[in-house]
Amino acid sequence: QKFKEIVDRLKEKRTLQDEEYKLLLQTKDAQEQAYLHKAARDVCQSIYGNGIFIRGLIEISNYCKNDCYYCGIRKSNHHVKRYHLNKEEILLACKQGYELGFRTFVMQGGEDGSYDDHMMVDIIKSIRKSYPDCAITLSLGEKSKEMYQQYYDAGANRYLLRHETICESHYNQLHPSNMQIQNRVQCLWELKEIGFQVGSGIMVGSPYQSIDHIVEDIHFLEQLQPQMIGLGPYLPHKDTPFKDEAKGDEQVTINLLAIMRLMHPQALIPSTTALATISDDGREKGILAGANVVMPNLSPVKHRESYSLYNDKANMNAEAAESLHLLEARLQKIGYTISYDRGDYKKEVKK
Ligand code: SAM
């Protein structure tokens, strides 16, 4: 009863006490979880219906100048077969995606210095010109405000940059000293100022993360009010310093996703590849807890294995852009369907 009252209050007030967040995050009780997840999916359906937006994810480069301890494409991993796509390859992926029905392209990559600023701006302009009806999302890490402004002016609409953890000491346990949380947060605010639809989020169960850290992250996202929220379990990669660390908890991830939906009813929340990787029906569980986006892989098939952020990353079957029929079949089984709309953030109409 107490649990239900807390969920109902979160739905109404969109905020809770820290101890209450912890209760919702940590519940393993099937009935409690069912109540929380249903509340979240009802909220999502009341705004976005039963359509799940699709985004074509183009992993443009696995070169990275950063050395995040958790990430498979970190600079010090010498086992990675490095690649980056040139303009023609990116445009070809967009063309294939457009023909498949995608109306959002997400260009994600490591922080690759070889795409000079001019080149990236040129690529964005070309996509904008060829596909005026599509949204262009970038996920290219930390840049200067001037650079972000140039991307925006060239035609990019959205930017994904997970803050990873808002706690400075925890951030420093996950990243070498040349990376700082203040910088990442500044980037997020600058992206918002420029006018991007902004996405942020965390890995659940990253090494050294406590439940209190997650509560701090909830507070940070409450302040930031991002239009998109990306959450996935931490999954180890065999060639990183964290290779022996435990993976994140699937249930906590899904509970957090539901909490985010109740706090941010209009947000675009993907059921992430990491969720689809941690268990076979992880993608479906995310949707049933309030996610409304999936991001099938639209990268050239020959490079997909090389964009390995964590072990066994899903990139085929229902995670593959060319197999949307498989995704559709899986969504139908749980009462959903693919939405081929561009899927922009819907601003809340205050009554
Ligand atoms: N370089 C860009 C950036 O930093 O935002 C985009 C690429 S980065 C690889 C995309 C996301 O992958 C990160 O924000 C991180 O949360 C996630 N990621 C990296 N390694 C991971 C792991 N081992 N388990 C789960 N997610 C991981």
Image: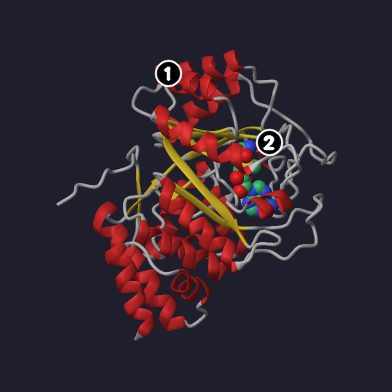
Q: Position of residue 170 (x, y in %)?
A: 67, 55
The residue to which callout 1 is attached is 153
Q: Position of residue 307 (x, y in %)?
A: 68, 41
The residue to which callout 2 is attached is 302
Query: Which picture quadrant has residue 251?
Result: bottom right
Q: Name the foreground residue: 274 vs 335.
A: 274
Quarter the N terminus occupies: bottom left
**Label 2 beta carbon within 8 A of ligand 1:** no
Q: Name the foreground residue: 25 vs 237.
A: 25
Query: Which picture quadrant has residue 104?
Result: top left
3 lies left or right of 112: left
Q: Which quadrant of the render holds ligand 1?
A: top right
Relative to residue 259, is residue 34 depicted above or below?
A: below
SS category of the residue bearing label 2: helix
SS category of the residue bearing label 1: helix
Q: Position of residue 86 (x, y in %)?
A: 63, 20
| Residues packed near mark 2 inside 10 Å, few (<14), some (14 to 19) or many (20 plus) | few
349 lies left or right of 324: left
**What residue do we see at 43% from left, 46% from top?**
224
Q: In the rendered image, is residue 136 in sight?
A: yes
Q: At label 1, which amino acid type do we have?
A: Asp
| Between marks 1 and 2 in the image, the one whose residue lies nearer the viewer | 1
238 lies left or right of 298: right
Relative to residue 16, is residue 60 depicted above or below?
A: above
Q: What mark, if any, has residue 58 been given in the picture?
A: none
